[in-house]
Image (cartoon, rainbow, N blue to C red):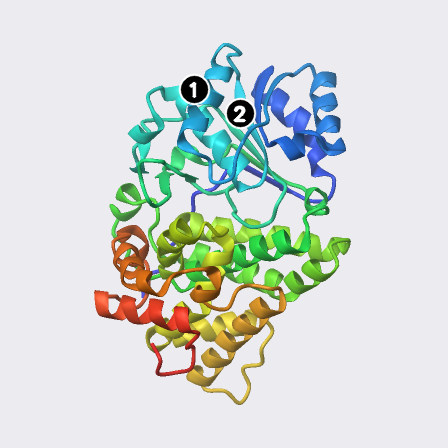
Protein backbone atom coordinates (compact mmCIF):
# COMPACT_ATOMS: atom_id res chain seq x y z
CA UNK A 1 0.00 0.00 0.00
CA UNK A 2 1.35 3.43 -0.97
CA UNK A 3 1.08 6.09 1.73
CA UNK A 4 -0.18 9.39 0.37
CA UNK A 5 -0.76 12.67 2.20
CA UNK A 6 -1.35 16.29 1.39
CA UNK A 7 -2.22 19.41 3.34
CA UNK A 8 -2.33 23.11 2.53
CA UNK A 9 -2.36 25.30 5.64
CA UNK A 10 -1.55 28.82 6.88
CA UNK A 11 2.09 29.66 7.59
CA UNK A 12 1.15 30.17 11.24
CA UNK A 13 -1.71 28.86 13.37
CA UNK A 14 -2.09 30.24 16.89
CA UNK A 15 -4.73 28.84 19.23
CA UNK A 16 -5.58 29.49 22.85
CA UNK A 17 -7.23 31.65 25.45
CA UNK A 18 -6.04 35.24 25.16
CA UNK A 19 -4.23 34.79 21.84
CA UNK A 20 -6.15 37.76 20.41
CA UNK A 21 -3.82 40.00 22.40
CA UNK A 22 -0.98 38.96 20.06
CA UNK A 23 -2.76 40.35 17.01
CA UNK A 24 -1.10 43.81 16.96
CA UNK A 25 2.38 42.29 17.18
CA UNK A 26 1.57 39.80 14.45
CA UNK A 27 0.18 42.54 12.23
CA UNK A 28 3.25 44.70 12.77
CA UNK A 29 5.40 41.94 11.28
CA UNK A 30 3.44 42.28 8.04
CA UNK A 31 3.59 46.06 7.77
CA UNK A 32 2.20 49.26 9.20
CA UNK A 33 -1.22 49.51 7.52
CA UNK A 34 -4.02 47.04 8.23
CA UNK A 35 -7.39 46.93 6.48
CA UNK A 36 -9.91 45.20 8.75
CA UNK A 37 -13.05 43.42 7.55
CA UNK A 38 -15.71 42.81 10.19
CA UNK A 39 -19.44 43.32 10.71
CA UNK A 40 -21.51 45.99 12.37
CA UNK A 41 -22.33 44.01 15.50
CA UNK A 42 -18.76 43.00 16.26
CA UNK A 43 -17.35 46.46 15.56
CA UNK A 44 -19.30 47.82 18.52
CA UNK A 45 -18.05 45.28 21.07
CA UNK A 46 -15.57 45.99 23.83
CA UNK A 47 -13.28 43.27 22.47
CA UNK A 48 -13.04 44.98 19.09
CA UNK A 49 -12.39 48.39 20.63
CA UNK A 50 -9.61 46.78 22.67
CA UNK A 51 -8.10 45.26 19.52
CA UNK A 52 -8.07 48.65 17.78
CA UNK A 53 -6.35 50.20 20.80
CA UNK A 54 -3.71 47.49 20.55
CA UNK A 55 -3.04 48.36 16.91
CA UNK A 56 -2.60 52.02 17.82
CA UNK A 57 -0.13 51.12 20.55
CA UNK A 58 1.81 49.00 18.06
CA UNK A 59 1.90 51.89 15.55
CA UNK A 60 -0.21 49.98 13.04
CA UNK A 61 -2.64 52.24 11.18
CA UNK A 62 -6.07 50.73 10.58
CA UNK A 63 -9.05 51.22 8.31
CA UNK A 64 -12.18 49.33 9.33
CA UNK A 65 -14.88 48.07 6.96
CA UNK A 66 -17.70 46.95 9.25
CA UNK A 67 -20.52 46.30 6.80
CA UNK A 68 -19.84 42.66 5.94
CA UNK A 69 -23.09 40.81 5.29
CA UNK A 70 -23.92 37.10 5.60
CA UNK A 71 -22.99 35.01 2.54
CA UNK A 72 -20.82 37.89 1.20
CA UNK A 73 -22.93 39.41 -1.61
CA UNK A 74 -20.74 39.84 -4.71
CA UNK A 75 -21.27 43.57 -5.13
CA UNK A 76 -20.50 44.27 -1.49
CA UNK A 77 -16.95 43.08 -2.11
CA UNK A 78 -16.49 45.72 -4.80
CA UNK A 79 -17.72 48.39 -2.37
CA UNK A 80 -15.36 47.15 0.32
CA UNK A 81 -12.35 47.12 -2.02
CA UNK A 82 -13.14 50.60 -3.36
CA UNK A 83 -12.90 51.97 0.18
CA UNK A 84 -9.62 50.16 0.82
CA UNK A 85 -7.68 51.12 -2.33
CA UNK A 86 -6.69 54.64 -1.31
CA UNK A 87 -5.57 53.34 2.10
CA UNK A 88 -2.99 51.07 0.39
CA UNK A 89 -2.93 48.40 3.10
CA UNK A 90 -0.03 46.05 3.74
CA UNK A 91 -2.39 43.32 4.94
CA UNK A 92 -6.07 42.46 5.30
CA UNK A 93 -7.44 41.23 8.62
CA UNK A 94 -10.75 39.39 8.90
CA UNK A 95 -12.33 39.43 12.35
CA UNK A 96 -15.69 37.72 12.79
CA UNK A 97 -17.63 34.77 11.48
CA UNK A 98 -16.97 32.93 8.26
CA UNK A 99 -18.39 35.69 6.09
CA UNK A 100 -16.00 38.26 7.57
CA UNK A 101 -13.06 35.94 6.90
CA UNK A 102 -14.26 35.29 3.34
CA UNK A 103 -14.68 39.03 2.78
CA UNK A 104 -11.08 39.55 3.89
CA UNK A 105 -9.88 36.89 1.44
CA UNK A 106 -11.86 38.44 -1.42
CA UNK A 107 -10.65 41.94 -0.57
CA UNK A 108 -7.02 40.78 -0.51
CA UNK A 109 -7.56 39.06 -3.85
CA UNK A 110 -8.99 42.11 -5.64
CA UNK A 111 -6.58 44.55 -4.04
CA UNK A 112 -3.71 42.39 -5.27
CA UNK A 113 -4.86 41.32 -8.72
CA UNK A 114 -7.69 43.66 -9.74
CA UNK A 115 -10.56 42.71 -11.99
CA UNK A 116 -13.97 41.53 -10.86
CA UNK A 117 -14.72 38.80 -8.37
CA UNK A 118 -16.38 36.65 -11.02
CA UNK A 119 -13.06 36.49 -12.89
CA UNK A 120 -11.87 34.10 -10.18
CA UNK A 121 -14.83 31.74 -9.72
CA UNK A 122 -13.78 28.10 -9.66
CA UNK A 123 -10.44 26.45 -8.95
CA UNK A 124 -6.91 27.79 -9.48
CA UNK A 125 -8.04 31.05 -11.10
CA UNK A 126 -6.06 33.24 -8.68
CA UNK A 127 -2.82 34.00 -10.56
CA UNK A 128 -0.48 34.46 -7.61
CA UNK A 129 -0.05 35.44 -3.95
CA UNK A 130 -2.29 38.12 -2.46
CA UNK A 131 -1.78 40.60 0.32
CA UNK A 132 -1.30 38.61 3.52
CA UNK A 133 -4.55 37.77 5.30
CA UNK A 134 -4.78 37.40 9.06
CA UNK A 135 -7.93 35.46 10.01
CA UNK A 136 -9.43 35.88 13.49
CA UNK A 137 -12.63 33.82 13.83
CA UNK A 138 -15.25 34.67 16.43
CA UNK A 139 -17.44 31.66 15.69
CA UNK A 140 -16.45 27.98 15.67
CA UNK A 141 -17.74 26.41 12.49
CA UNK A 142 -16.69 27.33 8.98
CA UNK A 143 -12.96 26.73 9.32
CA UNK A 144 -12.41 29.56 6.85
CA UNK A 145 -9.39 30.67 8.87
CA UNK A 146 -7.40 27.75 7.41
CA UNK A 147 -9.12 26.88 4.12
CA UNK A 148 -8.33 27.88 0.51
CA UNK A 149 -11.92 28.87 -0.24
CA UNK A 150 -14.11 31.96 -0.17
CA UNK A 151 -17.85 31.48 -0.72
CA UNK A 152 -19.99 34.34 -2.01
CA UNK A 153 -23.53 34.93 -3.25
CA UNK A 154 -23.89 36.22 -6.81
CA UNK A 155 -27.24 37.80 -7.77
CA UNK A 156 -26.82 36.43 -11.30
CA UNK A 157 -26.64 32.84 -10.04
CA UNK A 158 -29.14 30.74 -8.14
CA UNK A 159 -26.53 28.89 -6.10
CA UNK A 160 -23.69 30.34 -4.05
CA UNK A 161 -20.31 30.21 -5.76
CA UNK A 162 -16.78 29.62 -4.56
CA UNK A 163 -13.31 30.85 -5.30
CA UNK A 164 -10.82 28.08 -4.54
CA UNK A 165 -7.07 28.59 -4.59
CA UNK A 166 -4.14 27.88 -2.28
CA UNK A 167 -3.32 31.59 -2.66
CA UNK A 168 -6.45 32.37 -0.59
CA UNK A 169 -5.15 30.59 2.50
CA UNK A 170 -4.57 33.05 5.32
CA UNK A 171 -0.99 33.80 6.30
CA UNK A 172 -2.00 33.58 9.96
CA UNK A 173 -4.96 31.93 11.67
CA UNK A 174 -5.41 33.33 15.16
CA UNK A 175 -8.03 31.47 17.20
CA UNK A 176 -9.01 32.63 20.67
CA UNK A 177 -11.95 30.68 22.12
CA UNK A 178 -12.78 33.61 24.39
CA UNK A 179 -14.07 35.38 21.27
CA UNK A 180 -16.82 32.74 20.96
CA UNK A 181 -18.06 33.17 24.53
CA UNK A 182 -20.98 35.40 23.54
CA UNK A 183 -22.23 33.19 20.68
CA UNK A 184 -25.85 32.28 21.45
CA UNK A 185 -26.78 28.58 21.72
CA UNK A 186 -28.43 28.46 18.29
CA UNK A 187 -25.36 29.87 16.52
CA UNK A 188 -23.05 27.65 18.54
CA UNK A 189 -25.12 24.63 17.49
CA UNK A 190 -25.32 25.47 13.79
CA UNK A 191 -21.64 26.42 13.53
CA UNK A 192 -20.51 23.37 15.49
CA UNK A 193 -22.69 21.04 13.44
CA UNK A 194 -21.19 22.58 10.31
CA UNK A 195 -17.71 21.80 11.62
CA UNK A 196 -18.62 18.22 12.49
CA UNK A 197 -20.07 17.76 9.00
CA UNK A 198 -16.82 19.10 7.51
CA UNK A 199 -14.80 16.60 9.51
CA UNK A 200 -16.99 13.60 8.72
CA UNK A 201 -17.24 14.36 5.01
CA UNK A 202 -13.48 14.87 4.82
CA UNK A 203 -12.84 11.59 6.64
CA UNK A 204 -15.22 9.61 4.42
CA UNK A 205 -14.18 11.35 1.18
CA UNK A 206 -12.96 9.23 -1.69
CA UNK A 207 -9.33 8.20 -1.89
CA UNK A 208 -8.50 9.60 -5.28
CA UNK A 209 -5.05 8.17 -5.81
CA UNK A 210 -1.46 9.32 -5.61
CA UNK A 211 -1.17 10.95 -9.02
CA UNK A 212 1.38 13.77 -8.78
CA UNK A 213 -0.84 15.96 -10.96
CA UNK A 214 -3.88 15.63 -8.68
CA UNK A 215 -2.95 18.39 -6.17
CA UNK A 216 -1.74 20.58 -9.02
CA UNK A 217 -5.04 20.45 -10.89
CA UNK A 218 -7.56 20.27 -8.02
CA UNK A 219 -7.88 22.17 -4.76
CA UNK A 220 -9.88 19.37 -3.10
CA UNK A 221 -8.17 16.03 -3.63
CA UNK A 222 -9.91 13.53 -1.34
CA UNK A 223 -8.84 11.98 1.95
CA UNK A 224 -5.23 11.31 2.87
CA UNK A 225 -3.20 10.35 5.92
CA UNK A 226 -2.83 13.95 7.09
CA UNK A 227 -6.43 15.03 6.51
CA UNK A 228 -7.63 11.91 8.34
CA UNK A 229 -5.56 12.93 11.37
CA UNK A 230 -7.16 16.37 11.50
CA UNK A 231 -10.66 15.00 10.84
CA UNK A 232 -10.54 12.46 13.67
CA UNK A 233 -9.24 15.11 16.09
CA UNK A 234 -12.14 17.37 15.12
CA UNK A 235 -14.68 14.56 15.55
CA UNK A 236 -13.31 13.68 18.99
CA UNK A 237 -13.36 17.27 20.26
CA UNK A 238 -16.76 18.16 18.85
CA UNK A 239 -18.29 14.87 19.94
CA UNK A 240 -17.30 15.37 23.55
CA UNK A 241 -18.05 19.09 23.91
CA UNK A 242 -20.53 20.45 21.37
CA UNK A 243 -23.61 19.66 23.47
CA UNK A 244 -22.00 21.21 26.53
CA UNK A 245 -21.03 24.38 24.67
CA UNK A 246 -24.61 24.77 23.43
CA UNK A 247 -26.05 24.16 26.89
CA UNK A 248 -23.54 26.29 28.83
CA UNK A 249 -21.72 28.87 26.77
CA UNK A 250 -19.64 29.92 29.77
CA UNK A 251 -17.87 26.54 29.88
CA UNK A 252 -14.39 27.54 28.74
CA UNK A 253 -13.17 23.98 28.20
CA UNK A 254 -16.12 23.17 25.97
CA UNK A 255 -15.69 26.41 24.01
CA UNK A 256 -12.02 25.60 23.46
CA UNK A 257 -12.82 22.06 22.30
CA UNK A 258 -15.42 23.28 19.83
CA UNK A 259 -13.18 25.99 18.41
CA UNK A 260 -10.25 23.60 18.08
CA UNK A 261 -12.62 21.09 16.50
CA UNK A 262 -13.72 23.65 13.90
CA UNK A 263 -10.10 24.55 13.22
CA UNK A 264 -9.06 20.91 12.81
CA UNK A 265 -12.06 20.23 10.58
CA UNK A 266 -11.00 23.13 8.38
CA UNK A 267 -7.47 21.69 8.18
CA UNK A 268 -9.04 18.42 7.02
CA UNK A 269 -11.60 19.54 4.45
CA UNK A 270 -9.48 22.42 3.14
CA UNK A 271 -7.48 19.75 1.32
CA UNK A 272 -9.73 16.67 1.32
CA UNK A 273 -12.91 18.55 0.42
CA UNK A 274 -16.52 17.84 1.34
CA UNK A 275 -19.13 15.75 -0.45
CA UNK A 276 -22.83 15.03 -0.93
CA UNK A 277 -24.22 16.77 2.17
CA UNK A 278 -22.71 20.00 0.92
CA UNK A 279 -23.80 19.36 -2.66
CA UNK A 280 -27.44 19.03 -1.62
CA UNK A 281 -27.27 22.05 0.69
CA UNK A 282 -26.32 24.41 -2.13
CA UNK A 283 -29.71 24.15 -3.91
CA UNK A 284 -31.61 23.65 -0.64
CA UNK A 285 -30.04 26.80 0.79
CA UNK A 286 -30.86 28.75 -2.36
CA UNK A 287 -34.52 27.78 -2.06
CA UNK A 288 -35.01 27.99 1.72
CA UNK A 289 -32.52 30.75 2.68
CA UNK A 290 -31.57 28.75 5.75
CA UNK A 291 -28.10 28.82 7.34
CA UNK A 292 -25.49 26.73 5.56
CA UNK A 293 -24.47 24.82 8.68
CA UNK A 294 -28.06 23.91 9.45
CA UNK A 295 -28.58 22.53 5.95
CA UNK A 296 -25.44 20.40 5.76
CA UNK A 297 -26.05 19.00 9.24
CA UNK A 298 -29.64 18.12 8.35
CA UNK A 299 -28.34 16.16 5.36
CA UNK A 300 -25.40 14.44 7.06
CA UNK A 301 -27.10 11.38 8.65
CA UNK A 302 -28.86 10.59 5.35
CA UNK A 303 -25.63 10.90 3.39
CA UNK A 304 -23.83 8.69 5.91
CA UNK A 305 -26.59 6.09 5.52
CA UNK A 306 -26.27 6.29 1.73
CA UNK A 307 -22.50 5.78 2.01
CA UNK A 308 -22.78 2.89 4.48
CA UNK A 309 -22.37 0.09 1.89
CA UNK A 310 -18.92 1.38 0.87
CA UNK A 311 -17.71 3.28 3.95
CA UNK A 312 -18.73 1.17 6.95
CA UNK A 313 -15.16 0.92 8.24
CA UNK A 314 -14.60 4.68 8.13
CA UNK A 315 -17.99 5.38 9.69
CA UNK A 316 -17.14 2.95 12.47
CA UNK A 317 -13.89 4.81 13.12
CA UNK A 318 -15.95 7.99 13.43
CA UNK A 319 -18.03 6.22 16.08
CA UNK A 320 -14.95 5.29 18.08
CA UNK A 321 -13.77 8.92 17.90
CA UNK A 322 -17.19 9.97 19.21
CA UNK A 323 -16.71 7.67 22.20
CA UNK A 324 -18.75 4.64 21.12
CA UNK A 325 -17.45 1.22 22.12
CA UNK A 326 -16.39 -1.05 19.31
CA UNK A 327 -16.59 -4.19 21.44
CA UNK A 328 -19.27 -6.64 20.43
CA UNK A 329 -19.98 -4.86 17.16
CA UNK A 330 -19.19 -5.90 13.64
CA UNK A 331 -18.33 -3.16 11.14
CA UNK A 332 -21.90 -2.72 9.92
CA UNK A 333 -23.52 -2.56 13.36
CA UNK A 334 -20.90 -0.11 14.66
CA UNK A 335 -21.40 2.08 11.60
CA UNK A 336 -25.17 2.08 12.09
CA UNK A 337 -24.71 2.97 15.76
CA UNK A 338 -22.47 5.84 14.68
CA UNK A 339 -25.09 7.23 12.31
CA UNK A 340 -27.67 6.96 15.10
CA UNK A 341 -25.34 8.86 17.45
CA UNK A 342 -24.83 11.66 14.95
CA UNK A 343 -28.59 11.94 14.50
CA UNK A 344 -29.08 11.97 18.29
CA UNK A 345 -26.43 14.63 18.82
CA UNK A 346 -27.89 16.89 16.17
CA UNK A 347 -31.41 16.51 17.58
CA UNK A 348 -30.07 17.33 21.05
CA UNK A 349 -28.66 20.67 19.90
CA UNK A 350 -31.68 21.62 17.82
CA UNK A 351 -30.65 20.73 14.27
CA UNK A 352 -33.57 20.33 11.90
CA UNK A 353 -34.31 16.66 11.16
CA UNK A 354 -35.75 16.79 7.62
CA UNK A 355 -35.57 18.93 4.49
CA UNK A 356 -39.31 19.43 4.79
CA UNK A 357 -38.76 21.09 8.18
CA UNK A 358 -36.08 23.27 6.59
CA UNK A 359 -38.77 24.56 4.24
CA UNK A 360 -38.00 22.68 1.04
CA UNK A 361 -41.14 22.29 -1.07
CA UNK A 362 -41.91 18.75 -2.18
CA UNK A 363 -42.20 19.80 -5.81
CA UNK A 364 -38.56 20.99 -5.65
CA UNK A 365 -37.10 17.59 -4.76
CA UNK A 366 -36.25 16.67 -8.35
CA UNK A 367 -34.78 20.11 -9.08
CA UNK A 368 -32.69 19.93 -5.92
CA UNK A 369 -31.37 16.52 -6.92
CA UNK A 370 -30.48 17.68 -10.42
CA UNK A 371 -28.64 20.74 -9.13
CA UNK A 372 -26.77 18.75 -6.47
CA UNK A 373 -25.67 16.12 -8.98
CA UNK A 374 -24.21 18.88 -11.14
CA UNK A 375 -21.78 20.08 -8.45
CA UNK A 376 -19.01 17.83 -9.68
CA UNK A 377 -16.24 19.00 -7.33
CA UNK A 378 -18.31 17.69 -4.40
CA UNK A 379 -20.03 14.69 -5.96
CA UNK A 380 -16.77 13.17 -7.19
CA UNK A 381 -15.53 13.35 -3.59
CA UNK A 382 -18.37 11.18 -2.27
CA UNK A 383 -17.25 7.60 -1.57
CA UNK A 384 -20.34 6.07 -3.16
CA UNK A 385 -21.16 7.27 -6.70
CA UNK A 386 -24.45 8.90 -7.66
CA UNK A 387 -26.70 8.88 -10.66
CA UNK A 388 -29.85 10.98 -10.93
CA UNK A 389 -32.06 8.21 -9.55
CA UNK A 390 -29.93 7.66 -6.44
CA UNK A 391 -29.64 11.40 -5.83
CA UNK A 392 -33.40 11.80 -6.07
CA UNK A 393 -33.78 8.91 -3.64
CA UNK A 394 -31.37 10.57 -1.18
CA UNK A 395 -33.14 13.93 -1.32
CA UNK A 396 -36.54 12.24 -0.98
CA UNK A 397 -35.33 10.28 2.06
CA UNK A 398 -34.03 13.47 3.69
CA UNK A 399 -37.28 15.24 2.87
CA UNK A 400 -39.40 12.50 4.47
CA UNK A 401 -37.05 11.60 7.32
CA UNK A 402 -36.37 8.06 6.14
CA UNK A 403 -33.07 7.07 7.65
CA UNK A 404 -33.68 3.42 8.47
CA UNK A 405 -31.49 0.90 6.58
CA UNK A 406 -32.82 0.11 3.15
CA UNK A 407 -34.51 3.45 2.56
CA UNK A 408 -31.66 4.91 0.50
Residue 49 visible in the current orientation: yes
Residue 387 visible in the current orientation: no
Q: Label 2: how many residues lie within 10 Å, few (<14), some (14-19) or many (20+)?
A: many
Residue 27 appears at what percent x and percent y?
A: 61, 24
Residue drawn at (47%, 61%) of the image = 358
The mark that comes first in sequence, 2 or 1, is 2
**Does 23 sit left or right of 399 as displayed?**
right
Residue drawn at (36%, 58%) of the image = 280
Comparing 288 with 37, the one in front is 288
Residue 24 appears at what percent x and percent y?
A: 67, 25
**Vertical position of residue 392 compared to residue 104: above or below:** below
Comparing 224 with 51, the one in front is 51
Q: Which element type, helix, strand or loop, lies under badge 2?
A: strand
Comparing 222 with 70, the one in front is 70
**Does 368 sit left or right of 18 as displayed?**
left
Q: Classify the position of the N terminus by image quarter.
A: bottom left
Tell me, for residue 111, which label it has, or none.
1
Residue 228 appears at what percent x and percent y?
A: 46, 60
Instruction: Name the residue that disc number 2 marks.
Output: 92
What is the quadrant of residue 189 in the picture?
bottom right
Q: Are marks 2 and 1 in contact (CB under 8 Å)?
A: yes
Which residue in the rendered view is the most extreme toward the bottom?
Answer: 328
**Vertical position of residue 230 compared to residue 162: above or below:** below
Residue drawn at (33%, 74%) of the image = 310
Q: Classify the position of the C terminus by image quarter.
A: bottom left
Amino acid sequence: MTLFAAARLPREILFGKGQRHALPAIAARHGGRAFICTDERLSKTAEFVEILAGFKAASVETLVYDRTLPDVPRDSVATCVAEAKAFKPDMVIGIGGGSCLDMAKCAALLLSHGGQLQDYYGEFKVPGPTLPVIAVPTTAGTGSEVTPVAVISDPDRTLKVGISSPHLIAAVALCDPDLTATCPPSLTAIAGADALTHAIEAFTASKRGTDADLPQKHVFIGKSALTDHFALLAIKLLGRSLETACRDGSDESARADVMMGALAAGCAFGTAGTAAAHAVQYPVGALTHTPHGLGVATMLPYVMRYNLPVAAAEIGEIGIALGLSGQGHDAQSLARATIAEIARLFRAIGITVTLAELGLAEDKIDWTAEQALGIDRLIKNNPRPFDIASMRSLVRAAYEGQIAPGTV
